[in-house]
Image (cartoon, rainbow, N blue to C red):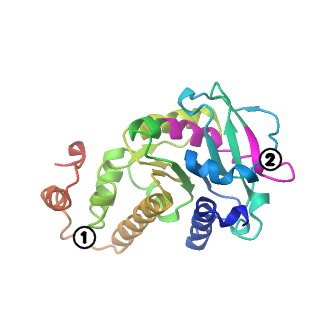
Amino acid sequence: MSILEIPVMRGFVRLCNDGWHQGWHERNGGNLTYRLKESEVESLKKYLLPARGWVNMGVQAKNLAYERFITTGSGKFFRNIEQSAAENIGIVEINATGDSWRTVWGLEAGAVPTSEFPSHFMNHSIRKIATGGLNRVIYHAHTPNLIALTYILPLESREFTRALWQSATECPVVFPEGVGVVPWMVPGGADIAKATSEIMKSYPAAVWAHHGLFCSGKDFDETFGLMHTIEEAANIHLKVLSSGRPILQTITSDNLRQIAKAFNVKLNEAFLD
């Protein structure tokens, strides 16, 4: 059996391919990481290579010490992952102090984890705490409709959440906490990692102004579904705004409460009237 036939690896590659076909990953845009379960590490163990040297990340999370992650590579194209996985993705392990990584599989020919790995790493730490260890996926994509909204909506969590919730009935069910918003920052460094981790203490998704969307979830389906739902809602909202017609009716705060009751979810009341 090839390592790529193991279910967790197959799921990782599938999400990358699905995101590419959605049009969210131009050139080398976007990145994905997954925090492996111990049972999955066991299934992968015979494929893991002698580790390369440690690389310090510039950030630290002690609750991720000794964890292993599957990660996309820096500068790699999502469209190539299905055809040449070992050159474009890899598995890294974290050291005892939670501040450095080293490659144990893949990332061939000198490749390294995504330049956004510090952001992913810090947010894995936060979401591990916030969800009692359930969240294992962090996914960043360049979702064009949501990016467009960051030019015309106030960069505030309440404004974005209400626009999305009121655009499609399933939205308050899929992300009842709402979404957070990070103002524009230079990508790839410790500053955006820390700013995003503050947002992710409360929300499963963070809007990166003029850049894209950052989502977390317990598995690949849930995380891709969250990304897809938010981007579709942004598309609907843009279509309504671009119609040039006045809005005659919408999903009200009372309607949102009715949805929450029917589907047994707890909405963020701070975002309701």
Are the residues at dot 1 and dot 2 in contact (C-beta closer than 8 Å)? no
* Residue 29 covered by magenta stretch: no
* Residue 106 covered by magenta stretch: yes
Nearer the camera: disc 1 or disc 2: 2
Marks 1 and 2 sit apart, C-alpha to C-alpha, by: 61 Å
* Looking at the image, residue 75 lies above or below residue 201: below
Question: Callout 1: helix, strand or loop?
Answer: loop
Q: Is residue 128 left or right of residue 34?
A: left
Percent across and percent down for residue 168 are: 30, 67
Percent across and percent down for residue 125 are: 51, 35
Percent across and percent down for residue 230 are: 41, 61
Percent across and percent down for residue 268 are: 25, 45
**Mark 2 = which residue?**
49
Q: Which residues are magenta?
A: 102-125
Q: Is residue 261 left or right of residue 185?
A: left
Q: Residue at x 28, y 74 (%)?
A: 245
* Looking at the image, residue 129 lies above or below residue 257: above
Q: Which mark is residue 246?
A: 1
Question: Looking at the image, is mark 1 or mark 2 earlier in the sequence?
Answer: 2
Q: Residue at x 50, y 35 (%)?
A: 195
Q: Which residue is at the front of the view, 212 or 61?
A: 61
Q: Is residue 216 visible?
A: yes
The amino acid pointed to by label 2 is Leu
Q: Is residue 27 visible?
A: no
